[in-house]
């Protein structure tokens, strides 16, 4: 089941009946806000770890990183550049929308691509570091645990609200027949709610009508689908914890960034095989947009790791 707004949370979990005001509070927005606040806290802790470890020797750079405005400056840059990147990459998959309604497509509250946010955020951070004349690799290294957590926790919002970011149906027919209605035998301990869902009452309002349902969000998928957004959430949140610990122990700048890019790329590349997506032909490959970007992220991460890029920002 999905919980598109606060009224569904209050009625389904607590049995409380709420007024119209609760319909205006969307669960995706609440979870995304929590993800941002938690990411800011993680970033602050990451900076403290780096300062405590005395990895910054320049007094000028120490002053910048210790500045009260530094974290919030980074936050604003990432939110703005990430939102622009997310919107542009999402529209790249549906160019017809630009032809039909350019203004509506650009300024719609829906239609954002997670990878676009990552790419846009990296681009914005690079420009910010060039402007401040500080090491991009160093700052990116420090922010990656927060980025992994933010992306992961944001995926929880996709799942709970039922925004359409879900996996393939558990059963397939015709030329591509398969049956994922339950986990493999060796994985039978896995909870059913972490495997598939029909996303009843999804905020995307996709599927068939729910019998007897009256009001908003009365749709459910005719066939349950894999809950890939939950899988991504678990992978990225665990990875965020590991990178946070590595940041404390590693003395080599660039290692956390490299490994984080590898994690972002590898997990998304394989998750895409179980998601509904558009395939693009390139040479002998037929992959989704996200998978091609994932390959570039993996190659970038491997290159950084192999080159042992360790600018210290001094």
Image (spheres, rainbow, N blue to C red):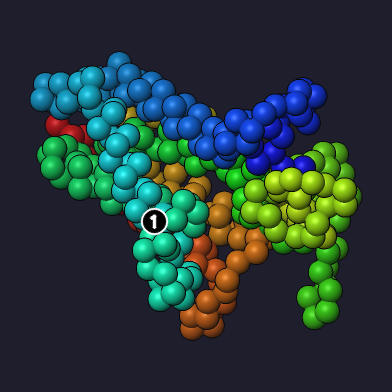
SS at mark 1 in the image: helix
Residue 108 in the figure: left or right of residue 181: left
Q: For the view shown, which residue lies furthest in the bottom direction?
A: 283
Label 1 Cα crowd, 10 Å radius (few <14 / some 14-19 / many 20+)? few
Q: For the view shown, which residue lies furthest in the top direction?
A: 52
Residue 114 in the figure: left or right of residue 227: left
Location of the N terminus by quadrant is top right
Instruction: Tell me what residue is drawn at x 60 percent, y 45 percent.
Output: 158
Q: Position of residue 184 (x, y in %)?
A: 85, 52
Residue 305 in the figure: left or right of residue 65: right
Q: Position of residue 16 (x, y in %)?
A: 76, 23
Residue nearer the viewer, 311 or 226: 226
275 above or below 310?
Answer: below
Is residue 244 something one can see in this rendering?
no
Q: Quadrant of residue 223?
A: bottom right
Location of the C terminus by quadrant is top left
Instruction: Tell me what residue is drawn at x 44 percent, y 32 percent.
Output: 36
Q: Quadrant of residue 152?
A: top right
Instruction: Tell me what residue is drawn at x 22 percent, y 24 percent.
Output: 69
Q: Position of residue 49 (x, y in %)?
A: 35, 20
Q: Position of residue 194 (x, y in %)?
A: 76, 42
Residue nearer the viewer, 58 or 127: 127
What residue did someone put label 1 on? 107
Residue nearer the viewer, 125 or 200: 200
Residue 234 in the figure: left or right of residue 120: right
């Amino acid at each position: 089941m999905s919980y598109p707004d606060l009224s569904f949370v209050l009625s389904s979990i607590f049995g409380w009946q709420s007024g119209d005001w609760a319909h205006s509070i969307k669960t995706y927005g609440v979870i995304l806000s929590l993800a941002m606040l938690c990411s800011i806290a993680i970033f602050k802790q990451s900076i403290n770890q780096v300062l405590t470890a005395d990895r910054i020797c320049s007094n000028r750079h120490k002053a910048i990183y210790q500045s009260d405005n530094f974290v919030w400056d980074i936050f604003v840059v990432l939110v703005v550049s990430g939102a622009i990147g997310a919107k542009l990459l999402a529209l790249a998959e549906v160019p017809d929308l630009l032809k039909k309604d350019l203004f509506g497509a650009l300024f719609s509250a829906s239609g954002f691509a997670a990878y676009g946010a990552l790419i846009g955020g990296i681009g914005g951070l690079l420009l910010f570091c060039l402007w401040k004349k500080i090491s991009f690799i160093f700052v990116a290294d420090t922010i990656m645990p927060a980025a992994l957590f933010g992306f992961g926790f944001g995926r929880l919002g996709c799942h709970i609200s039922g925004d359409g970011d879900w996996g393939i149906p558990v059963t397939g027919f015709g030329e591509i027949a398969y049956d994922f209605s339950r986990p493999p035998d060796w994985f039978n301990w896995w909870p059913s709610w972490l495997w598939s869902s029909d996303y009843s009452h999804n905020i995307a309002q996709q599927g068939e009508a729910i019998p007897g349902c009256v009001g908003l969000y009365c749709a459910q998928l005719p066939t349950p689908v894999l809950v890939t957004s939950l899988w991504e959430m678990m992978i990225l949140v665990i990875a965020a914890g590991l990178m946070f610990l590595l940041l404390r122990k590693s003395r080599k700048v660039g290692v956390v960034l490299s490994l984080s890019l590898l994690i972002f790329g590898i997990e998304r590349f394989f998750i895409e095989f179980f998601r509904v997506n558009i395939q693009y032909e390139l040479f002998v490959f037929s992959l989704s947009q996200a998978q091609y970007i994932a390959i570039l992220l993996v190659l970038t991460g491997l290159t950084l790791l192999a080159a042992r890029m360790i600018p210290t920002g001094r």
